[in-house]
Amino acid sequence: MAYEYPKSFARFYDLIYHQLRDGVDNNFFLDQISSTNGRILEIGTGTGRFFLEGINQNADIYGIDNSPAMLEVLKNKLEPKFRNRISLQGITDFKFDFKFDLVIAPFRVFMHLIHKDDQINAINNVYHHLTENGRFIFDMFIPDLNQLVKGFENHKDFEGEYEPGKMVRRFVTTKPDIINQIINITFQLEWDDLKSVQKEIWELPLRFFFRYELEHLIERSEFKKYKILGDYEGNQLNTNSREFIVIGEK
C-alpha cells in the first residue's frame, strides 16, 4: 500500500525539509551522483531535492515516485525537455528498458515498505535494474529505543513563513507498535490562509529495522556484496551511529 503525500504536504515539502534535512544527507548523496559516470535512478525523488541537483550537474539521472502530488511539484520546476525523466512508479515494481549504474533511495524510502515480501521484491527489482558492478544505496535511521517507546505527542517540529506574513506549522505524534516494528505517525499541518487557519492531517506507518535483521534481509536478496555504514561521512557502524547507510553492489 502506498501512503501518498497529500497536496498540502507536497506544497510545503520544500520549505520544511530544506530546513530539516539540508546539511544532513545532501553532501553524501550528491557526491554519489557526481561521481557516477553512467545512468542514475533516484527512487522517491519527491519534489527533486537531489534530482534537480543531478540535472544541474548534467548527470544522466531519472526519478520515480508514487505520489502524483509530489511529482507535480517537481514537474513544474523542470524544463520541458527533462520532464520525461520522471515517472509515477514504486520501488517494488518499477520498470525501465535500460539499466542503471547507481540507484539511490534516500531519506527513509525503504522504511515505507511494511511487509517482508515488498522489502525483498524491492531489493531484487533494483538488483535487476543495475548494470554489472552497479550500486544500490538506501538509508534508514537506527531506532532510539527510549524515544521509540516514549513517542511524541503533538510535537511541533517546524514553523516558518511560506509567504510574507503567512506561517506554516507542522506537528508530529508517534505511537509505536513494537511487535510489528512500526511507528505510526500522525502529521498535522496548519497554515495561515487569508483570515483563517487551514489544517490537514496525514497518517502513515514507518517500518523500523535493527542491524542483524537488516543484514539477514539483504542476504536473502540477490545481492551478494554489500556493506552498512553508520553515518553520511562514511564511518563504520559503532555505538554512536544513528543511521544505517546500506550500499549493495551487483
Image (cartoon, rainbow, N blue to C red):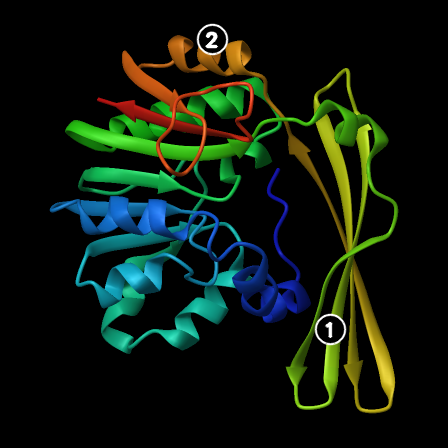
Relative placement, left or right, of 67 versus 171 is: left
Please tell me whether mark 1 sits on a helix, a strand or a loop.
strand
In the rendered image of this protein, does residue 154 appear above or below residue 189?
above
User: In the rendering, which numbered label is found on residue 168?
Assistant: 1
In this rendering, the answer to whether 105 lies above or below 187 is above
Instruction: Determine the CA span between mark 2 and mark 1.
Output: 42 Å
Q: Quadrant of residue 61?
A: bottom left
Q: Is residue 170 visible?
A: yes
**Location of residue 246 in the rendering, given as x and y in whole percent from the top left corner:** 39, 26
Q: Which residue is drawn at 45% across and 42% down?
A: 90
Disc 2 secondary structure class: helix
Where in the figure is residue 21, as x and y percent of width and height?
Answer: 53, 54
User: In front here: 69 or 10?
Assistant: 10
Q: Are marks 2 and 1 in contact (CB under 8 Å)?
A: no
Residue found 17% across the figure and 41% down from its top: 98
Q: In this view, does 120 lie above or below 245?
A: above
Q: Quadrant of the C terminus?
A: top left
Identified at 77% across, 31% down, the residue is 147
Relative to residue 153, is residue 219 drawn left or right?
A: left
Which residue is situated farthest in the front direction here? Answer: 240
Please state which of the two labelled residues, at mark 2 or mark 1, is closer to the viewer: 1
Three-letter amino acid code at the position of disc 2: His
Amino acid beneath label 1: Val
**Quarter occupied by the N terminus:** top right
Q: Is residue 223 visible?
A: no
Q: Residue 216 carries which label?
A: 2
Q: How many labels does the image show?
A: 2
Residue displayed at 34% across by 73% down = 78
Q: Where is residue 137 in the image (x, y as percent from the top left)?
A: 35, 34
